Image (spheres, grey):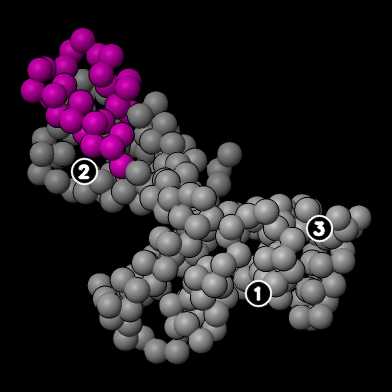
Amino acid sequence: MESIRILQDTYEKLYAITPKLGNLLETEFSQLNQVDWRDYYVDSFLQKKKVFKKEWNHLYEIDSYYLLELLKENWNLFREKSDSNFFNLDNFNLFVNRRNKVSIISIRNEVAHPEYWDYDIETYRAWKKSLDKAAFELGSDMSELLYELHKPEKDKMLSYILDNTTNITLKSEKLSDDIRNSVLKTKSIMEQQTTAAGIIAFFSDALKSLRGQQVVAELKKLGLPLFEDIKDEVFDMYYGIDKD
């Protein structure tokens, strides 16, 4: 597994748990009976850290580094006042203990500022174990968080492809059973993908495969829409050009 993939995958997991971390902090701060906890605890903290102040509605909008620092700074206060059993020594070590090289704050700092480009699989596994545990302690599951993170983009891309090609094709009464089965198989594989990246990889392969070219030849004869017809729009959608 290449270092860049290790860093990318780890950052994605950090990104996935950030809303849960923000929600935890909001819940705990709101229970401290401070009239304006946002100003008293958060904005004053950000000013102390010399962070450029910006408007925010929810804590997950703030960099995960500062959320973790907020958690650490107020850990003893939360532990004293909270009804939650979250604030125990194990979770302190897991989330905010800098001496722990696989704590969430240590992982975040390493991923944000990588010191070298030779990360090994054991490092990745240790990071993944901590992040999976963090998701659990925050009341969730990493696989579910990642699924929900990718679902809007995946659904948008899948709907665009199906609505503009596959679903139209399957309505045709001119299709042979052989070609129909291939189109149905293609649709099934795309629907099984959990990310837009999975869809774009399959979409790209379908454009190049031998069987794909055979199907394309038959669809052209019937005047039916092709993946090739919407290729530019699909790639633009995935790589960030919004034409809506």
Q: Residue at the right extreme?
A: 35
Spatial CA span between label 3 and label 2: 56 Å
Q: Secondary structure at mark 2?
A: helix
Whether 241 is drawn above or below 46: the answer is: above
Magenta stretch, main secondary structure, is helix
Q: Give the mark nearest the N terminus, 1 or 2.
A: 1
Q: Position of residue 209 (x, y in %)?
A: 14, 46
Q: Secondary structure at mark 1?
A: helix
- Determine if residue 237 is in view: no
Q: Nearer the viewer, residue 89 or 64?
A: 89
In the picture of the structure, the residue carrying the numbered disc 2 is 206
- Which residue is at a point 55% across and 80% down the rendered structure image? 97
- Which residue is at a point 70% across and 58% down the rendered structure image? 82
Q: Secondary structure at mark 3?
A: loop
Magenta stretch in the rendered image: 164-193
Whether 4 is drawn above or below 222: the answer is: below
In the picture of the structure, the residue carrying the numbered disc 3 is 32
- Which residue is at a point 21% across and 10% down the rendered structure image? 173
In the picture of the structure, the residue carrying the numbered disc 1 is 72
Q: Nearer the viewer, mark 3 or mark 1?
A: 3
Spatial CA span between label 3 and label 1: 16 Å
